[in-house]
Amino acid sequence: MVISIWVAVGLLVWRERAESLRTSALLTASLTRVVAERMDRTLFGIDRLLKDSITLLQAREDVHRDILINQMRVRSADFTELRNMFMLDAGGVVRISTIASLEGADLSHRSYFQDLRTGGGQDRLIITSPLLSTATGRVGILALRPLFDRSGAFDGAVAAVLNPEFFTDMLGGVMSTEVDRSVIANLNGDVLARLPGQSSDAVASIRTGPLFSEQLPRSRSGTFIAESAFDGKKRMASYIALERYPVVVSVGVTVEAALRRWTFNALVIAVAGAAFTLLVAMIATLLDRRDRAQSRAAAALIASEERYRTLVEGQKDLIHRYLPDTTLVAFNQAYADFHGQPRAVLMGKKWLDVVPEPMRADILAALAEMTPSSPTHEDLRKVPRPGDGVERWIEWRTTAEFDEIGMLLGFQTIGRDVTDAHAAEQANAEREEIYRQIFHHNPAVKLLVDPATGMIVDANESAALFYGYPVEMLKSLRITDINILPPQQVREEMAAVEREERMFLRFKHRLASGEIRDVEVYSSPFHAGGRPYLSSIVVDVTERNRFEAELAARSAELARSNAELEQFAYVASHDLRQPLRMVSSYVTLLGRSLADRLNPDESEFIGFAVAGVKRMDALILALLEYSRVGRANEDRGIVDLGEAMVEAAANLGLGSQDVEARLEVEGTLPMVMGVRGELVRLFQNLLGNAIKYRHPDRAPLIRVGCRQDGGEWVVWVEDNGIGIDSKYFDRIFMMFQRLHAETEYEGTGIGLSICQKIVRTHGGRIWVESEPVQGSRFMVAFPAVDRTAGLSKPVPASV
């Protein structure tokens, strides 16, 4: 039994030794991975800087030196580990440098330049060993990339000088009582940094050590035990050769340190063998309890994961978990449905592969930025749905998962489709922009008023300019502060607008200067957020009201003056006819009584006097008729122009044997609103002129017709008489204007003036179209009555 116990104790001690070594191996491997990832991220940034500089040089061969230097300085300022940058030509001479003293230096003898020049056209990053600069006297580590011309030939290099302290500082974070050695080297085995620090006789290269001679040829990462190339001590070391860059990171601990605790435990066990024998049973019991606890914990974990899976599966959000390289390890059904593929097809795939190429760099950068202290990232992206290509707005929330020592294990991302919400926000933004354009950027004065309180909720810049208050001050006023009506009356008016009983209001508003202005307010109610508002447009009508008042006064004065003038003309013409008749009668009697005593000339003179008096009487009679237009006692009503024309023709004897003229009517004349007697007089004058001014070589032919033109009826009277020259078109409608001598055509020269006055009093227009010798057409436009033409019976086609 004791032997069995000691065998068990021996096996336990040996297992503890193996466990101690395994724990140390895990520690060194984790720390190596941390340093390697930090180194990889940093070198990625340095390499990107070199590539950008190469791109600038290759894109623009004529790029100015100062521009390139400024670009290098600006970009390198973001990297504290970067000391300076320079560019070598194909001959190894420094052409451009952020340190001016380095320009012109010949570095062609340097081994790294020879390596680049003989590199066979490989585009790769080179990390040199620590080198002493002849220009600055300082030690630096160079990161270089070759330049190639368009034919692919070697054309120089771009270099970044790194502080060696940067590499040393990166190792400082992993040193502890349990880790006593760490090193960073390039692929040539040159030591870039190591801790503890190098002494004067320290090894500068570990190319011949077990790491480079035995381990790296077999694997780019691992853990091994061997004698150290630095001090010959037996160490356990983990190493990683970076995938993208020529750098190897190694962290190690002496086997003695790794087994220090185990050695102490073994000594204790050896010294207290008997006690250990007694404790075996207790240890076995503890182990059993631990195993039972672990079993219970495992069962609870399985149950918890099942509950979590059930909860996740019921979510509509796109939930998925993935490794650092974006390989999917778990996701819910909503995620699979979004991608339009079965779960079995998606599992194990890298979800980044289905993301559009332009978006991948940003996503990878966001994932790389997450740390244990800042493990979450949120962003909003518009992505095409893989299933059907429809673009959706997805709100992503990603959480990075780290272990207890800060190693990245993977990510969990929850995506929520917010397309509808985003569309609603965009629509709201568009509505707000439309409101700003319609309300704030409008030249009209606009106010938004709360009818419940009378507060001015909003006002535009035009309102601020009109009232003389800043917009913010206007929004602190009530409408009763600017409206001079009593507040109660203002509230009643707003209530009427709110009930939509009134949309147009007239007020007097007080400006900031104290001036009172007449305004017209066009107001309409609307509701927003369950509250009523009044949207009002304020129009300043002060000047218009003043002008309208002056115009009304002048119009009244003009109407009074015209009425007095017409009254005067009527009275004067009526009273003047009596003495003229007496003069005519007595001159005629005088001529008869002295007929036998007058010589021929005296008889002719008496004839002239009588003719003059008669002409004067005719003029006064015409003037009297002119003044009566618009003053007739006859009421206005619907007048059939066809009947009025027939009556006028009958008054002139048209159609009788004594009158040679022929009248033709085209179609049916309309009915208009007017005074029948005056319209008969209108046709009588126009028809009479057509007869009077006939052409001597042909019988008079008169045509009457009409057409509807929009809201008017246009009626014409056309003849084939002597016609009128166009230069007299305006003159013929003036009073007492004659184009012929009295001996040629009798008349007073007032007939067309009467026609014009009749037409105007009926709200119409009159004009003439004519050519000499070809005849004339007088056009009269009347406002249409319900757009109805009409005679109950047609006018005869000819009279």
Image: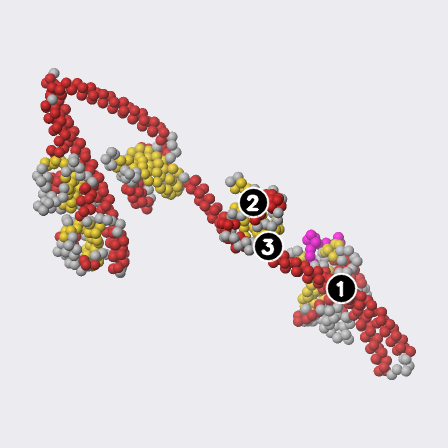
From mark 3 to mark 2, how far is it between C-alphas?
A: 20 Å
Would you call the spot at circle 1 few (<14 residues within 10 Å), some (14-19), or many (20 or more)? Answer: few
Would you call the spot at circle 2 few (<14 residues within 10 Å), some (14-19), or many (20 or more)? Answer: many
Q: Quadrant of the C terminus?
A: bottom right
Question: What residue sits right under mark 2 in the picture?
Answer: 454
For numbered disc 3, what is the local secondary structure?
strand
The structure residue drawn at horizontal position 14% and vertical position 30%, both measured from the top left corner, is 261
Question: What residue sits right under mark 3 in the picture?
Answer: 516
Looking at this rendering, what residue extends furthest in the bottom direction? 599
Prevailing secondary structure of the magenta residues: loop
- Residue 778 position, x and y percent, is 70, 65
Res 290 → quadrant:
top left
Q: Nearer the viewer, residue 109 or 609?
A: 109
Q: Nearer the viewer, residue 749 or 696?
A: 749
Q: Which residues are magenta?
A: 780-796
Residue 208 in view in this figure: yes
Q: Amino acid at mark 1?
A: Glu
For numbered disc 1, what is the local secondary structure?
helix
For numbered disc 2, what is the local secondary structure?
loop
Question: What residue sits right under mark 1 in the picture?
Answer: 564
Q: Are marks 3 and 1 in contact (CB under 8 Å)?
A: no
Q: How many marks?
A: 3
Q: Amino acid at mark 2?
A: Gly
Q: Is residue 784 magenta?
A: yes
Q: Quadrant of the N terminus?
A: top left
Q: Which mark is residue 244?
A: none
- Residue 414 position, x and y percent, is 35, 36
Looking at this rendering, what residue extends furthest in the front direction? 514
Q: Is residue 587 magenta?
A: no
From mark 3 to mark 1, how far is it between C-alphas?
A: 39 Å
- Residue 289 position, x and y percent, is 23, 21
From mark 2 to mark 1, how far is it between C-alphas?
A: 53 Å
